[in-house]
Amino acid sequence: MLAIWQYGGMVKVTYTFDDETVDRVRRISARLGKPQSMVVREAIKEYEARADRLSDDERTRMLGALDRLMQEPPTRSDAAVETELREIHAARRRWSRRGRRRS
């Protein structure tokens, strides 16, 4: 069940938590001297910041893929790569100069 109300600049929402989660929120609230709603808001904010990071399993999988890729022989010569990088750099400079003239 989810109910939502506007309440003094905040949105009042009703969620259903299991007993253990409610006990945790109450203990933290009492220990920190903060309202339970603030404890939940801060926990969600902290969780959001971590949710964008890779898990250990994801990191290990991606590093393994990178290690396998690094072991493969190059598909182009160093000279070909350098030529392409110079062309990209020159194109970016041309584009940058074009943008400055319009200002």
Image (tube, rainbow, N blue to C red):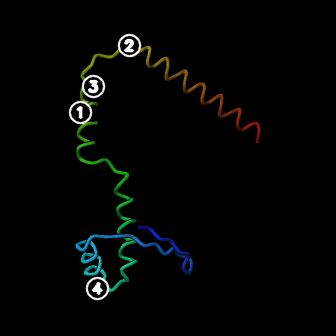
Residue 86 located left or right of residue 94: left
User: For the residue carrying disc 2, how many other residues have a C-alpha within 10 Å: few (<14), some (14-19), or many (20+)?
Assistant: few
Identify the residue at horizontal 55%, vertical 21% (top origin).
87
Q: CA distance from mark 4 to mark 2?
A: 65 Å
Image coords of residue 66 (percent x, y): 28, 31
Q: Quadrant of residue 65?
A: top left
Q: Which mark is residue 70?
A: 3
Identify the residue at horizontal 39%, vertical 59% (top origin).
48
Tell whether label 3 touches label 2 (CB within 8 Å): no
The image shows a total of numbered marks equal to: 4
Q: Quadrant of residue 70?
A: top left
User: According to the image, label 2 marks what residue?
Assistant: 77
User: According to the image, label 4 marks what residue?
Assistant: 30
Instruction: Give the SS element for disc 4.
Output: helix
Residue 16 located left or right of residue 4: left
Q: CA distance from mark 4 to mark 1?
A: 45 Å
Identify the residue at horizontal 25%, vertical 37% (top origin).
61
Task: Tell which of 101 and 11 is nearer to you.
Answer: 11
Q: Nearer the viewer, mark 4 or mark 1?
A: 4
User: What's under tag 3, amino acid-wise?
Assistant: Met
Q: Is residue 19 above or below residue 90?
A: below
Identify the residue at horizontal 38%, vertical 13% (top origin).
77
Q: CA distance from mark 3 to mark 4?
A: 53 Å
User: For the residue carrying disc 3, how many other residues have a C-alpha within 10 Å: few (<14), some (14-19), or many (20+)?
Assistant: few
The quadrant of the image that shows the N terminus is bottom left
User: According to the image, label 1 marks what residue?
Assistant: 64
User: For the residue carrying disc 4, how many other residues have a C-alpha within 10 Å: few (<14), some (14-19), or many (20+)?
Assistant: few
Tell whether label 2 touches label 4 (CB within 8 Å): no
Image coords of residue 82 (percent x, y): 45, 19
Instruction: Give the SS element for disc 2.
Output: loop
